[in-house]
Amino acid sequence: MSASNPTPEPLIEGPHDPEHDPRATYVLEPSHVTRLTDRVLATTGRTLPLTSPLDGAPLAHMPQSSAEDVEEAFRRARIAQAAWAKTPLEVRTAALLRLHDIVLDRLPEILDLITLESGKARKHAYDEVVHVALTARYYARTAHQHLDSRRAPGVIPGLTRVDHHRIPKGVVGIISPWNYPLTMAVSDGLPALLAGNAVVTKPDAQTMLTALLGAEMIEQAGFPRDLWVVVAGPGRELGTPIIERSDYICFTGSTATGKLIARQCAERLIGCSLELGGKNPMLVLRDADVDKAAEGAVRAAFSNGGQLCVSVERMFVADQVYDRFVERFVARTEAMTLGAGLDWEIDMGTLISQDQVDTAVAHVEDAVSKGARVLAGGKARPDLAPYFFEPTILEGVTPDMTCFGTETFGPVVSLYRFHDEADAIARANDGEYGLNASIYSQDGRRARELAQQVKCGTVNINEGFAAAFGSVDSPMGGMRESGMGRRQGAEGIHRYTESQTVATQRGITLGQNFGMGAEMHAKLMTASLRVLKKLGRA
Ligand code: NAD
């Protein structure tokens, strides 16, 4: 259990050969695909074909699980968890640190698979690996800080001893989306394992192979196989059986699904964390470094084709810099290298599905038909890949247009001019979401003051999203309809534990002592309360 397993054969046959079409040089080896699909706990005999958004080529036939398979997954996970909860913390932290090394050692293979399966640019696939490594290292290095039992002051100083323990919840259900298929499937589960839980996970159907590669690497790092059980199938079929058996649910996906899940968790009185959608604003203040802001805006709006929960879809730009900013932002967007392939030079890859293209097309067509102007992009590009949509900048978007307040979850951003910072903050806070915001200014102190007026769980200054997202010691998550609970930091691991307080009373009892009457006891207590306050006790 404590040692790592040998590195399996690489999934994808190389070598990289730039002379050839990169899609042709990376062929998924059928036996290796089977190695991954065999990890799904599925007995239905049904499979779902998986194809690559790069070119529509078949990737795998994914076995599909039933409600009975979910039941079996929890049975196995519960047995594994009972043993795992007894392992020393050192065994668990060592496995996390090995996982850190494994994801870096297997980097090319992981990037190939993420790109083949999701269509994103390789550089955006790389962000996922970095996030898994950061999360694994952070929780391994802070395990004692978050999980050790600690002594706390008791009600009668010196006579009441209090021990506060963190007990694992048991089996955590993780339901994850397709947009960051490695890190969304893996990173939330790492603190759960560290805290002594098992995980049953249902990744999104479109990106199962990457999630299964994550499961393979978790086992390779030394975590027992049944501690991380993967089931596959539609969320609307498997969601309820998972929630019915979980001790806690970690969900990442749309706000609509998040609300359904919250209701079911409430029915069972189990906790859940919900990382949901956003309509994230960026503010470019009058003193912003315009070049820096334009460079950041491209990454903030078009990373992973805008299919990113913390992606910026609304930009509020101060009058004084509006024209200069727009000119640079449009120029940088038009200079992006678009493409569908596995090489590092691509700045934006394809969207993942026709549904995603349909939403982007619908939002842009609706806006244009009502008077918005397209400053860059605006079109689907089937010549590049079946689901390609250009990075698109809109101006003149008004509240009657769908993309004004509805998340596109694609590469479409709207620009708005502002005169007054208070007005810009009010507009940024408009709507129901509150996930992430960005402020560009050369006055850090003022930007930090303004940040506290923004109703978002993370605010990045002079960066779009990565500064907060990558700072894994601090919590990340949404206010309002963007979610409940937080990933990362202390909150990201404590959500998977139950707090237990054990209080040992010594010497006198907490009732009346020494034959004292109730009135005398109350007088003594009142006097001691006054003394404790005077002494500065908490
Ligand atoms: P989605 O809610 O449709 O699906 C997400 C996951 O939930 C998938 O695994 C899916 O199978 C499952 N699911 C679907 N219906 C379910 C049900 N009834 N019960 C249980 N599970 C169910 O989301 P999507 O549209 O695929 O993903 C995009 C959305 O996710 C966007 O709104 C985006 O903003 C959000 N997202 C948020 C974050 C974040 O960290 N806040 C990260 C990524 C994506």
Image (tube, rainbow, N blue to C red):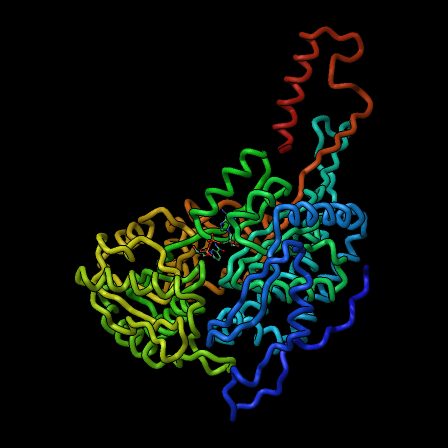
- Point out residue 307 in the picture as x, y percentages from the top left corner: 43, 63
Could you say which is closer to the camera, residue 188 or residue 452?
Answer: 188
Could you say which is closer to the camera, residue 359 or residue 509?
Answer: 359
Q: Tell me which residue sits at (80%, 11%) in the image.
A: 514
Q: Residue 517, relative to residue 171: is it above or below? A: above
Furthest toward the front, the residue is: 45
- Point out residue 30 in the picture as x, y percentages from the top left corner: 64, 75
The N terminus appears in which quarter of the rendering?
bottom right
Drawn side of residue 393 relative to residue 456, left or right:
left
Drawn side of residue 125 relative to residue 254, left or right:
right
Residue 137 in sight here: no
Q: Quadrant of residue 98?
A: bottom right
Q: Tell me which residue sits at (39%, 62%) in the image.
A: 355
Drawn side of residue 461 relative to residue 372, left or right:
right
Q: Tell me which residue sits at (63%, 17%) in the image.
A: 526
- Point out residue 132 in the picture as x, y percentages from the top left corner: 61, 64
The C terminus appears in which quarter of the rendering?
top right
- Point out residue 349 in the picture as x, y percentages from the top left corner: 44, 74
Drawn side of residue 313 relative to residue 460, left or right:
left
Q: Quadrant of residue 463?
A: bottom left
Residue 324 in sight here: yes
Could you say which is closer to the camera, residue 460 or residue 357?
Answer: 357
Q: How many marks?
A: 0
Q: Residue 358, relative to residue 111: is it above or below? A: above
Q: Tell me which residue sits at (52%, 51%) in the image.
A: 235
Q: Residue 257, relative to residue 437: is it above or below? A: above
Q: Residue 524, relative to residue 277: is it above or below? A: above
